[in-house]
Amino acid sequence: MKASARWLRELVPGLDLSAPAMADRLALRGAPVESIVSPGEGLADVVVAKVLTADRHPNADRLSVCTVDGGQGVVPVVCGAPNVRAGGWYPFAPVGAVLPGGLEIKKAKIRGEVSHGMLCSAKELGLSGDHGGILALEGEFTPGQSFVAALGLDDATLDVEVTSNRGDLLSHVGLARELATAGTGDIALTELPGSPRLEFAYQEGTPEARAGGVSVRIDDPDLCHRYLGAVLRGIQVRPSPAWLQERLRGAGARPINNVVDATNYVMLELGHPLHAFDLRRLAGSAVVVRRARVSERAFTTLDGVERPLGPDMLMICDAEKPVGVAGVMGGLHSEVEPDTTDVLLECALFAPKSIRATRKALGMSTDASYRFERGVDPAGMQQALERCVRLILAIAGGAVDGPVLDCVPVGFEAQIVPLRLARIERLLGVPFTSAQVRTLLSPLGFQVIGEGDGTLQVRVPGFRSYDVRREVDLIEEVARTHGFDAFPSDLGPYRAGNVPDHPLFRLEDELRASLVARGLYEAHTPAFAPESDGNVEVSNPLSATERYMRGSLLPGLLRRVEHNFAHGNRDVRLFEIGTAFARRGPGEPPLESTRLAAVLTGLRAPAHWTAEDEPFTVWDLKSLLEDVVRRAHGDALVLAPGCESARLDASAAFTVTDARGAIVARGGRVAEGAVDAPVWAGAVWALEVELPSEVPARGAVSYRALPTFPPVDRDLALLVPDQIPSATVTAAMSAHAGALLEEVALFDVYAGEGIPAGKRSLAFRLRFRAAERTLKDTEVDKTVRSVLERLEEELGVEPRG
Amino acid sequence: MSDTDLIGALRVLEREALAAVSGATDEAALETVRVTYLGRTEGSISKVLRGLGALPTGARPAVGQEANRVKIAVSEALKVRGLALAPQTRGSAEDLTLPSRGPWRGGLHPITQAVDEIWHIFRDMGFARARGPEADTEWYNFEALNTPLDHPAADEQDTLYLVDSVLLRSHTSPVQVRTMEAYEPPIRIIAPGWVYRRDTYDATHTPAFMQIEGLVVDEGVSFVDFKATLAEFARRYWGPDTRVRFRPSFFPFTEPSAEVDVKRVITKPDGTRVETDWLEVMGAGMVDPAVLENVGYDSERYTGWAFGMGPARIAMLKHGVDDLRTFFENDMRFLAQFSS
């Protein structure tokens, strides 16, 4: 909402605030001001000048050579406007002036005639789109006088951010109510210069009001609760007077013509969108408010755009056809034109939801629809219409013909809301007396009409009937007008909450700390993905990059590896914890899983002269994967070599499966081609682990007494066929060594010279121990012999020579 | 020899061996010492160990244990001396200004760091963390939060939809509803999480971003508690001199609603302290009774307050990052600036 500071000051007698001070006060009432600009911005160099003579240019038919008094002596000026005349006053940019848009005026020779400046059109001054000629000023001025001051452009336009519950603030009177305080007078509407005092007569009728051959009918009372129509005849369409143009400019609006300007003025003043129809164009001199018919498929609005209609759209029609989209925009063929003499002026009340649905379907928003959607004052319609009629009569002439047609299928009744003082204290934490509450609420138009048992009966004004319906809405008004900053802010005691800290957050904390300690950096990537990487589709994406939700975190993280490679970063260690999405049944929300993904590439430690550079290997990846799986799922899950994934190279990858057979983790070397890597880049290792949706409680560790008797160690070097995994050998040793075996550790792997082809040497250290005695070598030797026999029997593994 | 003699002999051998170890001045000499005492066949300690079999059964454990101890002690000494005598691999041991050797550093994403800092302050004030799904229904995202779908307020956070009434949550406020459905008051939670809006990427908008929700519900919770707790948070986060301002605003699920602004005191490089402009840091308010009723709470008995803030914006302000998109690039050189 753009508001004129001058207008606001005029509405609140005694309000002596600068525009920034007004902005501060509005901000503390909940309507912050985004910017303050002056409508005269950039026009400081422009003066008012009198054209003394205007003669045809000797060498050009369309140009005039004028003598102009701009206050600095009389100078010759060449002017291209058809409307320049001797004796007229015009805005003048003398030599050296800079106009909005940066045009600097220089002394020039135009077709042989010298020109010392420029007489300006409204468009050149950025005041309107009108480029029909130079801007003729009405009235008497002093040559050289500031143009900005002469036109009242030294106003300030406040761009007020109005929240969607406060439709009443989309008007100057609404904003003025928030600015009025104990120190100011009551809000007083501006006296309209030249407007007649009129007694208005009303012709009511439901569903149809009719008088003097003109009729108004509402066919769909659920969407239109009231329609007022006034007939004005004999008006003359022309530019508005200067004061009205100044008002509109101050409020950021552009003057168009006196009739349209009058409706805009009242909308900006009181918040009611009004519309003037050319009566000539209303077939049957009738207005019918009804939904679009199936046969009415399209309609051309006054912006010249043909728009498709739907059967739920409320239209303003004449006896035959639609002439406007109700509450949104009038039609091209019924708008006021320069030769219009008779108009029907509309002030209506439409259902906010209907307006919203219609304008969304049409993909447009207008000043009118914006206000109707947020609710206009049902109790102020007559005032708005009458004011607009009086303004039109004052500036366009003519007369009211007959009574105002008033069709009211749904009348408005002000609501009475009970307000308990005890409830105010309970919610706000501070007691308020009845007198305080009355003082706070009455400037906003709320009326206390009764009181008893600590409860006030509050009548809600029409302009607040949309957002104030309940006691709590009134309590907010009390708090707001009292001032949020006026409340104390003393920290009191509190009771501990019932909600425990979510275990998954705790697991995430632990995993993050662990990965950071291992030298990884956390990444954040948005959860969107291309179609190849997700099956949950966004139905209304804004761009192709957001069309699907990711099914895995890895692709996004690999893209970040590519970004780093592209910027020359060879050593990349990233992880992310986030959500992956998978499609479920039709219409159901997708399945979400929280996952951890990580990527490693480059050196496993910073280069140092004391050691050879070592890149990350499969063992680093395996360790990281084991660590994450253990923290997330406990010790029970083991890594199985191999992996079915297009992204990972199965020969250097692992899969982890849970007790129910579901894959919970994968990791390995990223397959060739899955990452766009420069030639210098090393292998990329990646893993992804699904975190449990229900984090299992960690059981207490059961302490085992430390051994008191010494162990006996035996080292075994074994020749193991290549196809037998070391884990199989370890498992077999554990199975056959009996209870005395405490630990098996592999400490060397060797293949090559001295080892038969198809085999490798694995060296294990077996540690034996008995809890209550010192073991004898003989019994250990016996056990080892037996283990070796079984290994040979079962696996073809034999001791190395 | 008797067992006691053997043990005595072992101790003599141990003394000799340790003296020989410390007397060795190069690696070759040390190897000779090793062979002399621990050599597999001729080593004097090894011989004692082999002789154990000749002892009477009852004497074996004591001697065996002692022999093992001596063997380990001598092995350790050999190892330590060996390290001392080993040639330096490269460079000079004396130049201690050379860079150290160690593992890579890592770090949390700056937005996670902001979330954690905020969480730790609220944790100290008795809050716990709650979470909810990122794909949710219109009911949880709008209607349960007193936001009718046909109200302009539902437009203000232009929402990404999946199917029918299933959407990507446009704020973390659905967690309020889900938490209240699952627990009885007192409720004292924050809910950090990802939210989604139909926005294009620019310096201050991304279609996915982090938000932190907060919710307190109990008997006797008032606007004064609301202001006090959030002002206390602001002072703990931005410093004790921070000024806090509450401005009326509108959110369908709180009433009264407020925007919370802070004015920080910063120290300029020349040591002077200046106040910043007011910065909008969160939207907040007293929980609307309609929301409490929607989850089956008695709104006459319980009152509460809630807030929502954007840790990315807070991290931007804190670190001087001027483009939100930088946070999504995950360039190692950027992340390393925030390493722990």
Image (cartoon, coloured by chain):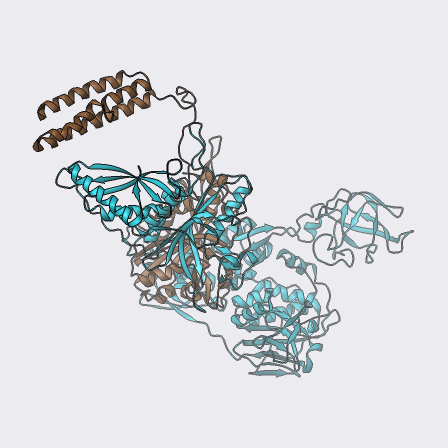
Q: Please determine whether, in this image, residue B18 is positioned above or below residue A570.
A: above
Chain painted brown: B
Percent x, y of residue B85: 33, 20
Q: Report the quarter where the C terminus of chain A lies.
A: top left
Q: Please determine whether, in this image, residue B190 is positioned above or below residue A239.
A: above
Query: Which residue is at the front of the view, A154 or B208?
Result: B208
**Left or right of B110, for residue A422:** left
Query: Which residue is at the front of the view, A205 or A427?
Result: A427
**Left or right of B168, for residue A219:** right
Which residue corresponds to the image point at 17% horizontal and 28% vertical from the top-left?
Answer: B49
Query: Which residue is at the front of the view, A609 or A36?
Result: A609
Picture quadrant where residue A773 is located: top left
Q: Please determine whether, in this image, residue B239 is positioned above or below residue B84.
A: below
**Left or right of A530, for residue B146:** left
Percent x, y of residue B198: 52, 58
Chain painted cyan: A
Q: Please determine whether, in this image, residue B222 is positioned above or below residue A708.
A: below
Q: Report the quarter where the N terminus of chain A lies.
A: bottom right
